[in-house]
Amino acid sequence: MTSTRNEKKYFTPPIDPDVALPSLGNERISAGRFSSSEFMAREWTHLWRKVWNLGPRIEELRQAGDFVTHTLGKESFIFIRGTDEKIRGFYNVCQHRGNQLVPDRHCGSEKFLQCPFHAWTYNLDGSVKGIPGAEGFPLLRDGIPKSEMGLEPIEVDFWGGFVWFRLDEGGESLADFLGELTQQLAPYRLQDMRLLEYKTFLWDSNWKVACDAFNESYHFRGLHPQMLKWADENARIELMGDHSRMINRYGTTSSPYTGTTEIYPELKEWMVYNGMDPEAYQGAPEDVWKTKADFVRSIQDTESITAPYANMTDDQLTDVYHYFIFPGFAMNVFPEGINGFRYRPHESDPQKMYYDLIMLVHYPAGEELACEHAFFEEKVQYDKIADTPMSYIVTDVLQQDADNVSINQRGLNSDGFRGLYLGEQELRLRHFHKCVDRYLATD
Ligand code: FES
Ligand SMILES: [Fe+2]
């Protein structure tokens, strides 16, 4: 797929802060949904099996035979590129005795897949290739009925450089499922970005605890107080079908720092992180973002610049467009790349989840992928595990979010908690839980 350097056909609309948000009610949301096994089981059959789910990056499957495994709840899948170049998805299970065909968390490149138990083999298109001692299976004496013996396929489609998959057939196409998101995000050219960081963490919380934690900026003041020195805590919010977005300005200040003259170290660091010289800055702290717009406009047409700045309005250069793609993927979108957060349910425990940090960037032309997917079951220090040196203003925030989810889960389990009491800045959470409830209420 080739992309033009700039796609001006679509543009990302701003959110008009004067448009009134819908009223979705004020009742408390009970916390049982974060710990109930019954709720988790119904989510699996009525939600996760029905929606389009975010799978691997297409760039992980570059050549025929390249494969990756990916888990969602109790299931493991294999995504593999065939000799016909097509990418397919299968349940990761051998049709002989149900052994997992490829152990979880594996990727590689093979001419065919061989089950480690009795060595049945499968072609890259999922059809059975060989059965050792086939003559010993009476049912196979007339030949192997290949259509019956192949791997169980799942539906796949592609958008934004990602493989998407769905378990239960029927329902809307991926394009309809994503709706206006595809046009809104087209200027960023996600399909041309490449993996910078890809890490999976086992977290001690329900997957929805993490969704909620990342879908509002009301928590800046409590959990990330340092962000008040370099970001606007108040988000503009918009609901988009089952999805939603919010926009926060970076390169500015929130109360109590607004109106002061001091450029705090964190704000200077934000400027350095964005290629600017803080010592040359003369203006007020809350206006720093304007300087980034001027800076970017001065360099955006340079040949070495791969970020699609020319597609962007000034506020897209500095404001964080945070998109939530229901039910389990959120991303902070910048012209230079995305910080993506995928939330996956655990295989059996409603109070555990897998959190995938997926950072993509527009690599400089000619540079190649050097990122490997890593897994962490223990608590980590982000600044110690990042493959690429990351600014402390980024790792501090990631760390604070990661450290809090289990604390939130513990409280949600308390008999003394009366249910979530949400404000207007948390409207996306209420919307999210209503969407989950709608899926779970279907027959
Ligand atoms: S279970 Fe796979 S070959 Fe027997
Ligand atoms: Fe946060």
Image (spheres, rainbow, N blue to C red):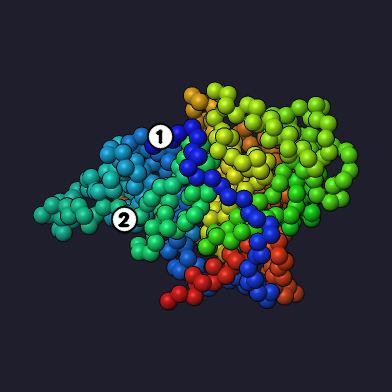
**437 on left or right of 51:** right
Name which residue type carries label 1.
Thr
Res 300 → quadrant: top right
Query: Mark 1 and mark 2 in contact (Cβ < 8 Å)?
Result: no
**Residue 391 pos. (x, y %):** 71, 35
Residue shown at the point (59%, 44%) measured from the top left: 333
**CA distance separating discs 2 and 1:** 32 Å
The residue indicated by pointer 2 is: 152
Task: Identify the element where label 1 is drawn.
Answer: loop
**Residue 109 pos. (x, y %):** 37, 36
Mark 2 CB within 8 Å of ligand 1: no
Name which residue type carries label 2.
Glu
For the residue pair 146 and 234, the one nearer the viewer reads as 234
Residue shown at the point (22%, 57%) measured from the top left: 148
Crowding at dot 2, Cα within 10 Å, few <14 / some 14-19 / many 20+, comes out as some
Any part of residue 50 in sight: yes
N-terminal-most mark, 2 or 1: 1
Q: Nearer the viewer, mark 2 or mark 1?
A: 1
The residue indicated by pointer 1 is: 2
Residue 357 position (above or below residue 268): below
Numbered tag placed on residue 308 in the rendering: none
Res 386 → quadrant: top right
Res 239 → quadrant: bottom right
Residue shown at the point (63%, 26%) measured from the top left: 299
Task: Identify the element where label 2 is drawn.
Answer: loop
For the residue pair 181 and 328, the one nearer the viewer reads as 181
**Residue 436 pos. (x, y %):** 54, 68
Residue 315 position (above or below residue 243): above
